[in-house]
Image (cartoon, helix red, strand yellow):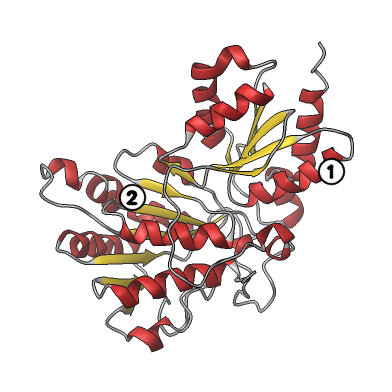
Amino acid sequence: MRILTFAEAIREAISQEMAKDERIFIMGEDVGIFGGPFKVTKGLIDKFGEKRVRDTPICENSLFGAAVGAAMTGMRPIVEVHYADFLACAMDAMVNEAAKMHLTSGGQFSVPMVIRAPTGSTNRGATHGQSLEAWFMHTPGLKVACPSTPYDAKGLMISAIRDNNPVLFFEHRYLYGTRSPGGKFNSEWDKKESLNTNVPEKSYSVPFGNAEIKRDGSDITVVATMLMVHKALEAADILMQSGVSIEVIDPRTLVPLDKEKIIESVKKTNRLVVASEDHLTCGIASEIIAIVCEEAFDYLDCQPQRISAKDIPIPFSPGSEDYVIPGVSDIVNMVGQMVGKKDE
């Protein structure tokens, strides 16, 4: 096996695609000399130069507007923000320009740009720890990727760069496996065995809209995203000791969503839990459960359940954050309750 960290896998994908296509360039705050806040773009400025790895001022709306214009005129920009929370500063450029330009121009323009957004709660507080993926599921014209492993991160990044549509590429900070400016590993999660996926050196792509069954099971389906995939896999290990078999599905992309694979699993297990780190109300879990209830309701033996962040701002205190963000025990307890209803 060839093991790369999550961050290294993304960097390799970008580097390989930039070497093939001179239209591709990177722009963002600190992406050049500093190598990005989580060192994902480290060394790329030495390889490709300042014209193709561009440090920008702290002004997300202008940054994204420039990227939209560059993409419309034939370039293929990759834009990075320090934190996904800052996407709120560039909503007009993304939602009213990038997402709609192909339609409103009658197909004359495409906007092939990738927006890299480090996401997830990592003890950084209310404005640096939100998971906003569901916002962009609600925006026709944008694609949304959310890898959970280094293998998927590289393959999905290559697919995103090659796509002629704007792509939001969410990267959970606890999965990077790299040192942040504080000098310490982000968390226990970046060392998990489930992150040790084989990452081929050659270029490859993971298609959008193709979910992966990370673990086969028969008693209940757990659909999980990003870091929650690894929490679900740990919960599955715990529950297996009690004879409970969990099928863990990673959508890998939210737009397009592979609903067929999810529904097929629910038809087999007859139970569904969706675990995601965004807030509970109007979130990823709500949408996936709605789809299953519309298209596979008769196969459900009990009501589906959501495991998501509580509907309060993300707190700074680690203890308080642990209360708000769902953990392994939440999945274990919920699944235990639902499988306990098996014979009722």
Relative placement, left or right, of 116 versus 283 is left
Q: Residue, x 71% and y 44% (percent of image)?
A: 232
Relative placement, left or right, of 181 versus 234 is left
Q: Secondary structure at mark 2?
A: helix
Q: Label for residue 91?
A: 2
Image location of residue 308, percent across then percent down: 63, 38
Residue 227 lies, with reference to residue 27, above or below; the image says above
- Identify which residue, 12 or 180, lies in the foreground: 12
Quadrant that contains the C terminus:
top right
Q: Residue, x 76% and y 31% (percent of image)?
A: 334
Q: Quadrant of residue 164?
A: bottom left
Image location of residue 258, percent across then percent down: 47, 36
Which residue is at the far right? Answer: 242
Which of the two marks, 1 or 2, is nearer to us in this view?
Answer: 1
Q: Residue, x 84% and y 43% (percent of image)?
A: 238
Residue 20 lies, with reference to residue 228, above or below; the image says below
Relative placement, left or right, of 99 versus 246 is left
Q: Secondary structure at mark 1?
A: helix
Instruction: Say which residue label 1 marks.
Output: 238
Which residue is at the far bottom? Answer: 46
